[in-house]
Image (cartoon, rainbow, N blue to C red):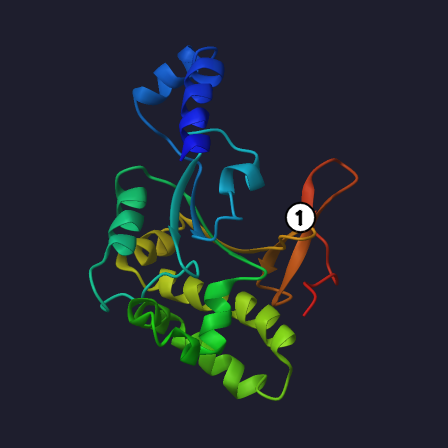
Amino acid sequence: MHKLHHGLHQFKTEVHAINEEFFGNLARGQAPDAVFIACSDSRIVPSLLTQTDPGQLFIIRNAGNIVPPHGDTCGGKEATIEYALEGLHIKNIIICGHTKCGAMAAVLHPEKLETMPNVQKWLGHAQKTKEIIDRHYSDLDFDFQHSVVVQENVLVQLENLRALPSVARRLWKREVELHGWVYDIESGEVYVYDPIDEEFEPLRYARDGSLELADGLGMPR
C-alpha cells in the first residue's frame, strides 16, 4: 500500500498539477471514442495499449472479457454497455482478449476451480467457447488449445454482444461497429479480427501511413 499511496501523491503533485485545464475539462463531462471490454488481468492496461488519455476509453473489465448472453441476468455488464450506447452515444465497441489468460486456462480445465465456485459460475458464460474447443481441437496439446480458446472466446463474446437489444438496434441502423482484438503480451502485437479472412491479423502501416490489416499473417496458434 505504501507504493500506491506514494503514487497518489505523485499523481497529484506531478501529473494533475501541470494538467489542471485538461482535468478541469474532464470534470465537465465525457465523450469516449470507444467501449473497451477487457480482461481483469493486471497485465492488461487498455490506455497504455492504445496510447489514449483519460476520457477516451469507456472501459469494462472482468475475468475473461466476457459479455453474458442477454436474458441470463440483467447484470452490470449489459447495463453499462446500454449506458455507453444510449447515454454516451459511443459508436465503437472493442472486445479484447489476451495471451496467457488465466480465465481461459480455467475454461479449458474447470476442475481446477473447485475452491472458486463463483469464478466457475462466471466462466460458465464461456461454455460455448469450451464446446468449440472440445468439438474441433480436443486432440491438440494445451498450449495450442489455450491460444485458440483466447481467440474463439473473443468471437463468442462478440456474438453475445450482438444479441443485446441496445447493440442490435444500433447495428441495424449502422450506428455502432464491433471489433475483436487479441493482445499478445510478450510480443506487444495486437491482432484484429478480419471477418472476411475469418482470422485475427496484425495491424501494419501502409505506404501512405495509414494502418491496415496484414493479409495472410494470421495470429499464431
Q: Nearer the viewer, residue 173 or 64?
A: 64
Decide if residue 2 is in sight here. Answer: yes
Note whether residue 154 is visible.
no
Horizontal side of residue 183 vs 31, given as left or right = right
Query: At which x and y percent is residue 61?
Result: 39, 50
Q: Quadrant of residue 9?
A: top left
Q: How many marks?
A: 1
Expressed as whole percent of the image width and height from the top left, the position of residue 203 reads 68, 49
Give the SS element for disc 1. Answer: loop
- Residue 50, x across and y down, in percent: 56, 39
Identify which residue, 42 or 38, lies in the foreground. 42
Check the image and report above or below for 142 versus 76: below
Query: Which residue shows up at 41% across the image and 25% down it?
Result: 8
Residue reaching furthest front?
Answer: 2
Indicate whether 97 appears above or below 81. Answer: below
- Percent across and percent down for residue 201 are 66, 58
Q: Is residue 125 above or below residue 51?
A: below
Q: Quadrant of residue 115?
A: bottom left
Describe residue 170's horizontal placement relative to residue 36 as left or right.
left
Residue at the far right in the pictured view: 207
Q: Which quadrant does the C terminus fall into?
A: bottom right
| 166 left or right of 11 in image | left
Viewer-proximal residue among 44 and 25 = 44
Q: Which residue is mark 1?
A: 188
The residue lying at 37 percent from left, 69 percent from top is: 123
Closest to the observer: 124 or 128? 124
